[in-house]
Amino acid sequence: MSILELDNVTKTFDGVRAVDRTTLGFDKGKITSLIGPNGAGKTTVFNLISGFLHPDEGVISYQDRPISGLAPWDIAQMGIGRLFQDVRLFNQMTVKDNVLTAFKKQRGESALMSVIARWKVAKEEQLLSSRAMKLLDFVGLAEKEEELAENLSYGQQKLLSIARLLGADADLFLLDEPTAGINPQMVKVFLDVIRRLTEEGKTVIVIEHNMNVVIEISDWVYFMDEGQVVSFGLPNEVLGDPEVRAAYVGL
Amino acid sequence: MIIQLLVNGIINGCGYALVALGFAFIYNTTRTFHFAHGAVYTLSAYFFYTFYNLLNWSLSLSAILTLGLIALCGILIDDVIYTPLVKQGASLFIQMLSSLGLYIVIINFIAMVFQSETKILNPEVQATYSIGNVILTRIQIVTTATFVIIFGLLMTILKKTYLGKVIRAMRDNPDLVSAMGINPQNVRRVVFALGSALASVSAILIGLDVGIDPHIGLTAFLNGAVAVIIGGVGIFEGAALGAILLGLLQSFAIWKISARWQELITFLLLILFLLFRSEGILGKRRRIEEAKI
Amino acid sequence: MNYVFHLLTMINIYTILALSLNLLVGYTGLLSLSHAAFYGIGAYISTLFMMNIGLPFLPSLFLAILGSVLLSLIISIPSLSLKGDYFVLASLGFQIIVFTILYNWIDVTRGPYGISGIPRPNILGIQVESIASYFIFSGVLAAICAGLLYLIGDSPFGRVLKAIREDEISAAALGKNIPRFKVIAFAIASGFAAVSGVLFAGYLQYIDPTSFTLMESVFILSIIIIGGTGNLSGPILGTILMIILPEILRFLRIPDTIAPNVREIIYGILIILIMRFQPQGLSGEYKFE
């Protein structure tokens, strides 16, 4: 059952079609991978879905409602969460604060409430605090709660970004190269996390260059090149396609 | 009357244009918001005053000495203040704030040494010339001629020489410069020397025209920065165009409204451009959207 | 002794300015050069209401805050789309525009002639008259403002502001309405700046536009750069240091004619040194980077 659809979507930059009349569909509860060479338009697709870019043509629908043209924060509030290719943490904030920021619908995010309803906000903070610690525990960063995010190692930073994303309580996850630059043990951790998400009914879309990962977890694969979907299907089908193999040197 | 205003506007614009071009050379290539450019301007005026009025040296000697010293000051400022920050990976904000700090230091030194009242550099009454209904003072003519010559020289350098090529490379793609086998540090030095020298030319000319005080630099700098934004950041001709337009606009403001509201018009224009046409008049409409993810 | 009260009163006034600018610059990361404009707007609005229609102090204060907040929307809402450099420039433009209006709209503001004879406040029957009592009055107001700004900053709201400062894009991806938070932060900062303006007017009992220039904005910014941003102690320390500094110079027998210049040179050098060697300021939490 399709939860997200891009229908004939085009996005042009400086005369170049980064995404070219592309149609994509993503099923609920499944893990779909977007693969393709650099510059194929995959991250642009993510930007379009999450609202950081608006399509020049075409419609993007989430749960049958059109979302193209909405602001990124509105789309995020609808339940779409995003992991960026560069770990984008709040560097000069603590690990714990990074996670706390992710929670939605915080009463204390109103300046007014923080002043006149301080008690209520404090209580809510206590609850959020334990939720945050649970997430940090889950990724193994509980001891580092007071550490500034910028002082973590790269791998730890990636784990923190996962914890933060989980805190956002999304239904649809856009993960941009989640396993890049981390060691194989941690890759396993990430894959476990991704599988657990789908077990809970969440949908995951992954941009990946690591073909082993793609084969291991994908329910469905789209291969993009130069802004268009060139091939799609089950992982083995797509990765067996000679055109796809040709586009990837050294597969 | 209108023609006189127009002409005055253009001539004032030519004066701003030199400062603007100086700022543009520095900003376009290094992206440093060189607030201290205003201090360099003021420093130039006071160096010249010292040589010309206090030491009674000849005009040309004073001018040349000032230019040379100021060019060196420009290099010194970059070497001592900005480059170490760049090496530290400091953001443009930090550089800008440091620049503000430097501006404050220099201006106050000048005020301390020379006091704050306006000093006249040229006590004689200006010779005037009339062309038709328009009256021009000698200094106005010199300013305009200087600007035209310098502009021509700069454009030639930029478009026809290797140096110009390197400068344009620095603007578009600093990494390219190292790839070309050139030390970016040296390009920075050239640009700061050149930009500062341009400011000093303007300071001398305008100083001879209307006198000097420690705050002329701020006005000159702000006008220059506005001119660069209006004309188009990154485009050298834009600085000159923006400056002349600004001069014209201010003239019209004086005519239609009143001289008092000049600054309001200038900065209203700045804000309008920032909001609706941040690429400036000559800039390419590159509406690059928010995300560069 | 009066002189000590004078210094302390100025510290109170500037503490509010520093702490409020801190919310904008230190927490949200919005470098603004227009704080003095709101300082001035607050001073003029309250003064004009009190002197032209005899409105009592408290309503005048309220209107000054309201006016400042509303005017902040004029600059903040359109500027939301502007990136870093350009936002600073826009705030600079706004500052100069406000100054030009205060200076030239002589019919209303009396421009450079200034407005004198501003009454000392009368709050619910209590007349705050002497310098000593003004010190207490301004101290109470400063403490209230500091307390409020603390509550605002040390909260989930403050956390979002910091997140915006750190990485606007992932904050947006987490569902935070970036423009809304920025506008609110700007409005809060401007409202508090107005309070300082009202205090200033009531204290000196005279105002003119030369107290609310671009260089004044730079001065307030310097306070938090030197003292430190992102927390409470930085701005307060910065304020105390910068207000006391002229007194230290006087103590060192620096002649009055050049004392203001020396003072400014010192703080200019401090800015340069801090930006180079200690970007978090003397006591701040956030490093400008």
Image (spheres, helix red, strand yellow):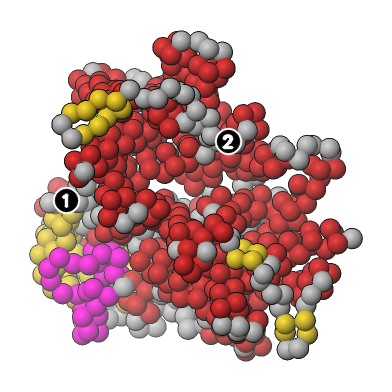
- Dividing the image into 4 quarters, which one contains the N terminus of chain C? bottom right
Q: Residue at x 86, y 62 (%)?
A: C2
Which SS class for mark 1? loop
Of B287 and B111, nearer the camera is B111
1 or 2: mark nearer the eye? 2
- Mark yes or no: residue C251 visible: yes
The label shown at residue B274 is none
Specify start and end residues of the magenta stretch as a single range: A45-70
Residue C233 in the image, given as x and y percentages of width and height? 72, 61
Q: Is residue A225 left or right of residue B52?
A: left
Specify the amino acid type for callout 1.
Asp
Q: Which residue is mark 2?
A: B117
- Taking the view exactly as shown, the residue that stands out farthest to the right is C1
| Above or below for B85 versus B113 | below
Of B218 and A26, nearer the camera is B218
Q: Which residue is mark 1?
A: A14
